[in-house]
Image (spheres, helix red, strand yellow):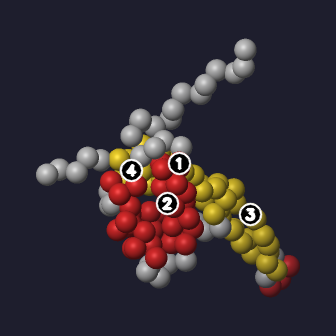
């Protein structure tokens, strides 16, 4: 009698994780996301661990969440996971004001962004 099961948003051999309200601009976050696209998860985690960019910590959390989703929810082998997609989107923008000379005001925009990471299980080629 309950609700019907929602269809999967990704393929059977993939898992997804999202990070929302990340306090950095989408442009800066996308620079970090480019580092891991197409890489094996083990290599991507190592790259994020030793990256000097502040956004790398947030991307690493989301990547680890995607790996945990793959292992626990979809029974995928974590040793054969590859970062299939990593894309960034805009979120809210906080607007703040700073007083300037002659009664004017300076606008300060504090953007937030979100990241989606899809990991996919691939078969090892012999």
Q: Secondary structure at mark 2?
A: helix
Residue where numbered disc 4 is placed: 77
Q: Position of residue 47 (x, y in %)?
A: 39, 73
82 or 1, nearer to the observer: 1
Q: Nearer the viewer, mark 4 or mark 2?
A: 4
- The answer to whether one can see residue 77 in this image is yes
Q: Nearer the viewer, mark 3 or mark 4?
A: 4
- Of the image marks 3 and 4, the number of the one nearer the N terminus: 4
Residue 123 falls left or right of residue 3: left
Tell me what residue is drawn at x 44 percent, y 63 percent.
33
- Circle 3/circle 4 CB separation < 8 Å: no
Tell me what residue is drawn at x 43 percent, y 80 percent.
50
Q: Position of residue 70 (x, y in %)?
A: 47, 48
117 or 79, nearer to the observer: 79
Asked if residue 90 is positioned above or below residue 57 in the image, the reply reads above
Image quarter of residue 98: bottom right
Residue 94 circle label: 3
Q: Secondary structure at mark 4?
A: loop
């Amino acid at each position: 009698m309950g609700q019907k099961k929602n269809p999967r948003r990704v393929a059977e051999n993939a898992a997804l994780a999202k990070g929302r309200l990340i306090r950095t601009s989408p442009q800066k976050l996308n620079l970090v996301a480019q580092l891991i696209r197409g890489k094996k998860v083990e290599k991507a985690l190592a790259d994020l661990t030793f990256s000097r960019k502040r956004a790398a910590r947030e991307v690493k959390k989301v990547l680890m969440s995607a790996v945990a989703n793959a292992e626990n929810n979809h029974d995928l082998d974590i040793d054969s996971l590859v970062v299939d997609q990593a894309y960034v989107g805009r979120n809210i923008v906080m607007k703040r004001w700073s007083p300037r000379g002659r009664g004017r005001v300076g606008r300060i925009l504090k953007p937030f962004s979100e990241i989606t990471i899809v990991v996919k299980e691939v078969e090892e080629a012999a």
